[in-house]
């Protein structure tokens, strides 16, 4: 059996906050405003896994009103989603994702991000694809007011 899931997330950027993308710290002069660490890519991936397994969404599992998730490492959300899917017989086959940011250039960080995502999903790095796009200098992404991410995950079961 096959199940596909879609995830999307956006965070507002403000000066002087740490930027983490796909579990990797990225040096930059701005970072996300968020309850957790604001890792937009890991949030999209969490929603893609939950979506494929028909388990709702990240906001239901990890409410931003819950002090437990204040400043949380978003790797935890991906792991919890993967484990919840696994408990129901689903395993991740592959991930495709896109990060939308005008700055910083993420290309040099993509190999590290891929490796980290493969670890979190417990799949081969060859089954993980990460793309980076600018906002073409228009809209909130292009004006560097926000960072966004999209993710698609395929789950299979025997
Ligand atoms: Mg988010």
Image (cartoon, helix red, strand yellow):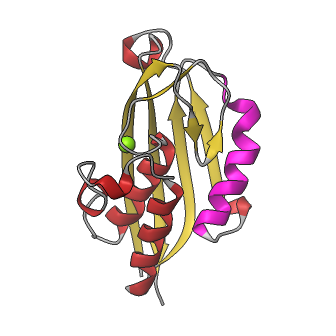
Q: Which residue is drawn at 55% across and 57% down?
A: 95
101 left or right, relative to 81: right
Q: Main secondary structure of the magenta part?
A: helix
Q: Which residue is drawn at 57% across and 40% down?
A: 21
Q: Give the range drawn in magenta.
A: 105-121
Q: Position of residue 107 (x, y in %)?
A: 71, 31
124 left or right, relative to 158: right
Ligand 1 rendered quadrant: top left
Magenta span includes 107: yes
Q: Where is residue 60 in the image (x, y as percent from the top left)?
A: 23, 60
Q: Where is residue 27 in the image (x, y as percent from the top left)?
A: 68, 27
95 left or right, relative to 66: right
Task: State the count of labels.
Answer: 0
- Give the position of the N terminus as an image quadrant: bottom left
148 left or right, relative to 116: left
Q: Which residue is drawn at 72% across and 37% down?
A: 109
Q: Which residue is drawn at 23% across and 49% down?
A: 65
| Outermost residue toward the bottom in this view | 158
Q: Is residue 81 above or below residue 136?
A: below
Q: Is residue 62 above or below residue 146?
A: below
| Outermost residue toward the front in this view | 67
Q: Nearer the viewer, residue 143 or 27?
A: 27
Q: Position of residue 36 (x, y in %)?
A: 41, 45
Magenta span includes 18: no
Q: Quadrant of residue 87?
A: bottom left
């Amino acid at each position: 059996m096959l199940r596909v899931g879609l995830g999307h997330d956006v965070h507002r950027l403000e000066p002087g906050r740490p930027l983490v993308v796909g579990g990797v710290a990225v040096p930059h002069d701005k970072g996300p405003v968020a309850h957790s660490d604001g890792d937009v890519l890991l949030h999209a991936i969490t929603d893609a896994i939950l979506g494929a397994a028909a388990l709702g969404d990240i906001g239901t599992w990890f409410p931003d009103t819950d002090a437990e998730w204040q400043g949380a490492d978003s790797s935890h959300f991906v792991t919890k989603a993967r484990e919840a899917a696994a408990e129901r017989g689903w395993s991740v086959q592959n991930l495709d994702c896109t990060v939308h940011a005008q700055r910083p250039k993420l290309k040099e960080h993509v190999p590290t991000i891929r490796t980290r995502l493969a670890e979190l999903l417990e799949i081969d790095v060859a089954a993980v694809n990460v793309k980076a796009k600018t906002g073409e200098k228009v809209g909130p992404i292009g004006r560097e007011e926000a960072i966004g991410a999209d993710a698609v995950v395929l789950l299979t079961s025997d």
